[in-house]
Every structure is written in structure tokens, then in C-alpha cells.
Image (tube, grey):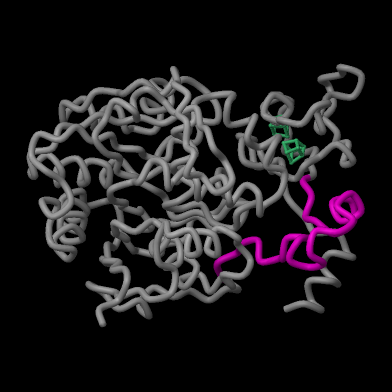
Amino acid sequence: MSPAATVALVFCESYEDEAAVLAAVARGFDLLGGAGRFFQPGEQIVLKPNMLSPDTPDKNVSPHPAVFRGVIKALQAAGVQLTYGDSPGFGKPSAVARRMGLSRVADECGVPLADFEEAETVSFPEGHFVKQFDIAKGVLAADGLVSVAKFKTHGMMRITGAIKNQFGCVPGARKAGFHARMSDEDKFARMLVDLNLLLKPRFCVMDGIVAMQGNGPRNGDPYPLKALLFSNDMAALDATMARIIQLDPRLSSVFRYAQEWGLGETQDIEYVGEPLERFIVNPAEFKANREPAPTTVVGGFLETFLKQYVVARPYIEEDKCVRCGNCVHACPSTPKAVNWHDGDRTKAPSYHYEDCIRCYCCQELCPFDAVQVETPPLGKFLNRLRL
Ligand code: SF4
Ligand code: SF4
């Protein structure tokens, strides 16, 4: 019996030689039978690059412009009509795309920006956990979606790759509402899988030429993985990420729900192109949140206690903080769990951990790597008992 999913793995040394990057992207499509296997000429496809924040390509937060160009070229060669966009955590999509170098590539290739600011409410009765989403009009206007993801770590979800990338199809502040309601990793994972079941991404190209490890998804360190990943199965791609960084898949509920709810395949995966072993990293060199979530420790009891004393929590390194207020603005909790002390902006904001839902939006969106995450001693002790 043939494997349930196929992932193409392609080696690419760096971004310096754009022709080599374009050739590597084209090879990834070819290994899976060519773009024409997944798209019809004349179809309207929206590209969804990960555009988290207004950072330049050297910050390594988004797919590199050369990879983006490669995806555009491959799809245009198949006769597909393209738009692109995302709803960043901060800033207008047009400004973020410009800063990331993506709008220049899109303009040169004749790919317009889609509307990721206005949304329409979409009913989803088939949803296992979420029955309704507000989706960007630019996504709804397209025949299909291609996820252009970045290989990065994430505080709450451990990794941010193919599946989580689609969260940017929920525009602006509506994302914060989900963070507030889906206040732990398990609920958030269920929401993400439902969202992907609704959107049915047609294909994903993941840029891991330089991956991000450590304090991702915005302030992590570069890791020269030298890999591009391709698949029409979002779950298989993320499961491949986990295999590459040797992350225990039990640590992320995304894998469980993606498999159980039929989003894709996390185990029976065939690799074409380079062998998977070529890219597997030493976990000591590729830092990621490898601590279990509290619900996997004791099954969801004593939530308040667990959040206080077991779950990894954010804190601010005062000397790195420039008092920009992004963390305060990003916090979806009511009342704000990170805020100015008596409105005093001469000091770094401080945390009220009893109000904190551990969504790590503050860590995700701090532009200056000032927000770090640490597991309290009791959490570390329990984690050692379990694993
Ligand atoms: S911790 Fe980061 S986001 Fe928050 S005020 Fe300081 S620099 Fe800005
Ligand atoms: S303080 Fe940070 S982790 Fe806590 S709820 Fe606010 S944004 Fe989320």
C-alpha cells in the first residue's frame, strides 16, 4: 500500500544565489509531479506567506523573498492567477510586505495584494470545535490557497509551520479574540485544525533554508537547515518539521487532532528528494519549547494552580526593553496581563500572572527580543517525571 502522504525535501545552500533558490523551488514541485498536478490553468490562487511582523529578510521571520519568487514562478508557469497576503500581528499588510521584501517581488511578478483586512463570517457546521470563522475576503475570493510557511519555533505551539500559518487568514484583532478564548495549547490546536479543515490549503512550500530556533517566532536565532519542504498535506509537513528537530509529537496536540480529524497524515509519510536523515538536527543545537503543556501532565485539573506554578511563563529582560508597548497592545487578556505600572512608561511593563492565559503573544510580537519564556521550577520537575 502506498504511503498516505508525500513530502518533498530539497537541499538549498543559502539565499545568496537566487537562481539556485529558484531551481530548488522548481525541483520541489517537480518531485511531487509538478504544479500542474495540483492546480488548473486560470485558477485564482492566493499565496499566504507568513508575514508576522514588519521585519527585514535578514531577521528571518518570513519566507525569504527568493523563495517567494520561486513559488510565484512555479505557479505562474502552470497558468495560475495569483494574489498574496496575510494579516500580520502588527502593521498593515502592505507595509509589512514592503519591509519583508515580498511586495517588491510580487510587484515585479505582477501579483497583487489581496484583501486581508476585511473579513466575512463563514459558518462551518462540520467544525469539530469551532463552528464559525471570520476569514479575510482575499482568501474567500480565491479558488484555493497556497501556504508559504517558514520553519520556526513557537512558544505556545512548539513549531510554527504549515498548519499555524493559516491563522493569518483571520484578520486583525479577531486573532486576539481566538487567543483569549482558546486559552491553552490544546484548545488552540483544535481551532487551528478546524481552520485548516475549512480552508483546505492546496499546497505548502516551507522555507527552512535558514530556519529559526530558540525564542521564535520573531526573535529566535538563525539555524542553517538548508532545506525546502513541499507537500499538499499540511499535517505531514509539520510532522516532518517535528522529526527534523526531534520534537516529541506528543508535545503538540496539533498532530493528534490533525490525524484524528482527517486534516492529514502525521505518521505514514513518504519522502522524495533528499533523505530526511540529511536534515535531522541535534536537539541540543536547535532550541525549542520541549516542556509538556499542563494538560498533558495532569489532564486539565487545577488549571489556575498549573498556570501559576507549572506552565512556562513570559518575563521581560529590562535591559532589552525599549518601552515600545507592543506587548501591552498585543495582550488579548482582560484585564491586560502585561501592562505599564500605574501608566509609567519609563519602566518596562510588568506581568500579572494570575490574568495571563499563556498565549505568548507578547513574546511573539516584541520587536527587541526582550520577552523571554521560562518554566517555573515545579513545572521543570513534573516534566522530568513525565518524559
Ligand atoms: S518588552 Fe518588548 S514589546 Fe514590551 S515594551 Fe519592552 S520592547 Fe516593547
Ligand atoms: S501576558 Fe503575554 S502570554 Fe500572558 S496573556 Fe498577555 S500576551 Fe498572552
Residue 85 screen position, x and y as percent: 35, 30
Magenta residue check for 304: yes
In depth, the one of 38 and 247 nearer the eye is 38
Q: Is residue 381 left or right of residue 357?
A: right
Tell me which image quadrant ligand 1 sits in: top right
Task: Indicate whether residue 330 is drawn in magenta.
Answer: no
Residue at (85%, 33%) from the top-left corner?
350
Residue 67 x, y percent position in the rendering: 27, 47
Q: Residue at x 53, y 74 (%)?
A: 246
Side (left or right) of 291 relative to 268: right
Vertical placement of residue 132 versus 31, above or below: above
Residue located farthest toward the front when viewing the structure as drawn: 125
In the figure, residue 328 lies in which quadrant? top right
Residues drawn in magenta: 285-314
Q: Quadrant of the C terminus?
A: bottom right
Identity of the residue drawn at 65% across and 29% down: 177
Name the spot of residue 302 as percent of width and height, x first. 90, 56
Q: At 15% from the left edge and 43% from the top edge, which residue is drawn?
A: 75
Question: Nearest the camera: 356 or 65?
Answer: 356
- In the drawing, does residue 240 fall left or right of residue 359? left
Expressed as whole percent of the image width and height from the top left, the position of residue 342 reads 92, 19
